[in-house]
């Protein structure tokens, strides 16, 4: 069973912010910003590549609820999902990072030439 499936089953503790029948939001154990929350579907999908449009629609509403819960809907935030090896995904269970609570930087994603592909 994957790490986040164990968190869903409460076999591994987490710092939960919001939960319903289908989704869970909890604090990232290694925060990259003052607010760093992970939102996951309880159904296991390996990544965004596998998720259904129906689950994504519900996930959108859940993320909107979470940002209201932690009161960052006005100040702004970033939603990220890493996919696969090149995407930097470490946990193979679909999750969306919600980052906020400060002015986030934007920039350096790789050491490759950004003009190099096309
Ligand atoms: P990713 O690299 O997109 O797969 O993100 C995985 C995230 O899970 C990282 O930001 C980790 O800090 C976080 N993480 C790993 N283990 C735990 C845990 N037990 N509780 C909360 N967050 C975790």
Image: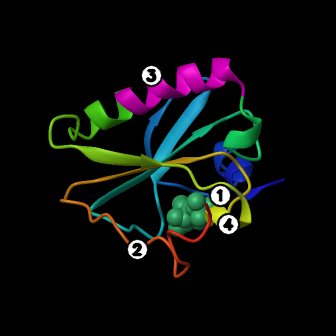
Q: Mark 4 points at which residue?
A: 86
Q: Residues within 10 Å of mark 4 (few under 14, many from 20)?
A: few
In which quarter of the view is residue 116 placed? bottom right
Task: Point out the frontmost of discs 1 and 2.
Answer: 2
> What's the residue at 66%, 21% (across, down)?
53
The CA span between labels 1 and 2 is 33 Å
Task: Point out the frontmost of discs 3 and 1.
Answer: 3
Position of 107 compared to 28: left or right? left
Mark 2 near ligand 1 (CB under 8 Å)?
no
Residue 17, given in percent of the width and then of the height, sits at 40, 42
Mark 1 near ligand 1 (CB under 8 Å)?
yes
Give the magenta part as a residue range.
Answer: 52-64
Residue 62, given in percent of the width and then of the height, sits at 46, 27
Mark 3 near ligand 1 (CB under 8 Å)?
no
The CA span between labels 3 and 4 is 28 Å
Task: Point out the frontmost of discs 3 and 4.
Answer: 4
> What's the residue at 57%, 31% (across, down)?
23
SS under mark 4: helix
Displayed-image quarter of ligand 1:
bottom right
Nearest the eye: 108 or 103: 108
SS under mark 2: loop
Residue 89 visible in the shown view = no
Q: Which of marks 3 and 4 is nearer the N terminus?
A: 3
Q: Name the residue under label 1.
A: 12
Nearest the eye: 86 or 79: 86
Q: Main SS type for the magenta part?
A: helix
Q: Name the residue under label 2.
A: 108
In which quarter of the view is residue 82 placed? bottom right
In magenta segment, residue 53: yes
Residue 82 visible in the shown view = yes
């Amino acid at each position: 069973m994957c790490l986040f499936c164990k968190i869903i089953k409460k076999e591994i503790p987490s710092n939960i912010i919001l939960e319903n029948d289908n989704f869970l939001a909890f604090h990232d154990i290694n925060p990259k910003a003052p607010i760093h929350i992970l939102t996951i579907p309880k159904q296991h999908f390996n990544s965004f590549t596998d998720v259904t449009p129906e689950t994504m629609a519900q996930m959108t509403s859940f993320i909107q609820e979470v940002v209201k819960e932690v009161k960052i809907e006005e100040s702004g935030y970033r939603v990220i999902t890493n996919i696969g090896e090149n995407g930097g995904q470490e946990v193979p269970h679909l999750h969306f990072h919600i980052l906020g609570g400060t002015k986030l930087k934007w920039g350096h994603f790789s050491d490759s030439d950004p003009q190099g592909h096309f």
